[in-house]
């Protein structure tokens, strides 16, 4: 569920960025072109500030979702030492019991007669 929310937030960020870029692309023109600047500077600035604030809010939600709410699963700490592989220890031998070197366990189970 968290991964889906992370994808939705990233999609919203990209959609908002492309929409605001399209807005400004239509409003900005080359110096000698025939497009008139009927839009006021205040309205254009308000759209830019609003889009920026929404993008910052979505980035904050994405950051909190990944770090706090664990949308993408539990992240491993970066500075934790890696666990070393356990050494193979010899079997524990009771001090009172003698083990002969020829007594090895067989690979097949012993056959028992069933009644």
Image (spheres, rainbow, N blue to C red):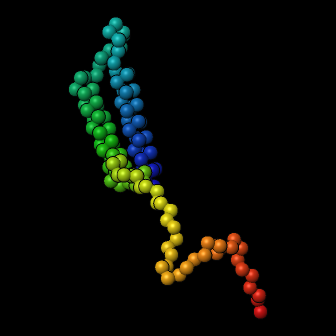
* Residue located farthest toward the left when viewing the structure as drawn: 42
Of residues 2 and 25, the one nearer the viewer is 2
Q: In percent of the image, x 35 and y 55: which residue is there?
A: 69
Residue 109 appears in which quarter of the rendering?
bottom right
Give the vertical position of 110 relative to 14 (above or below): below
Residue 44 percent across, percent down from the top left: 27, 26
Q: From the viewer's perspective, is 63 left or right of 114?
A: left
Whether residue 14 can be seen here:
yes
Residue 42 located left or right of residue 60: left
What is the x, y in percent for residue 94? 49, 79
> Residue at point 46% right, 50% down?
4
Figure quadrant of the N terminus: bottom left
Front in this rendered view, residue 79 or 38: 79
Q: Quadrant of residue 58?
A: top left
Residue 36 lies in quadrant: top left
Seen at 34% across and 7% down, the residue is: 32
Residue at x 41% of width, y 41% of height:
10
Q: Is residue 35 above or below residue 14?
A: above
Query: What is the x, y in percent for residue 60?
Result: 30, 44
* Quadrant of image for the C terminus: bottom right
**Against 100, is 38 above or below?**
above
Furthest-bottom residue in view?
115
User: Farthest top residue?
Assistant: 32
Q: Nearer the viewer, residue 83 or 43?
A: 83
Q: Is residue 32 above or below residue 9?
A: above
Query: Is residue 65 among what the camera can see?
Result: no
Residue 61 image position (x, y, % from top left): 33, 47
The answer to which of 83 and 91 lies nearer the viewer is 91
């Amino acid at each position: 569920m968290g991964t889906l929310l992370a994808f939705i937030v990233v999609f919203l960020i990209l959609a908002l960025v492309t929409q605001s870029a399209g807005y400004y692309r239509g409003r900005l023109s080359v110096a000698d072109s025939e497009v008139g600047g009927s839009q006021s500077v205040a309205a254009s600035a308000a759209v830019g500030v609003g889009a920026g604030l929404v993008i910052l809010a979505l980035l904050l939600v994405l950051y909190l979702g990944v770090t706090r709410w664990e949308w993408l699963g539990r992240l491993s700490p970066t500075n934790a030492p890696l666990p070393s592989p356990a050494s193979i220890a010899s079997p524990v031998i009771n001090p009172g019991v003698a083990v002969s070197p020829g007594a090895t366990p067989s690979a097949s189970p012993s056959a028992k007669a069933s009644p």
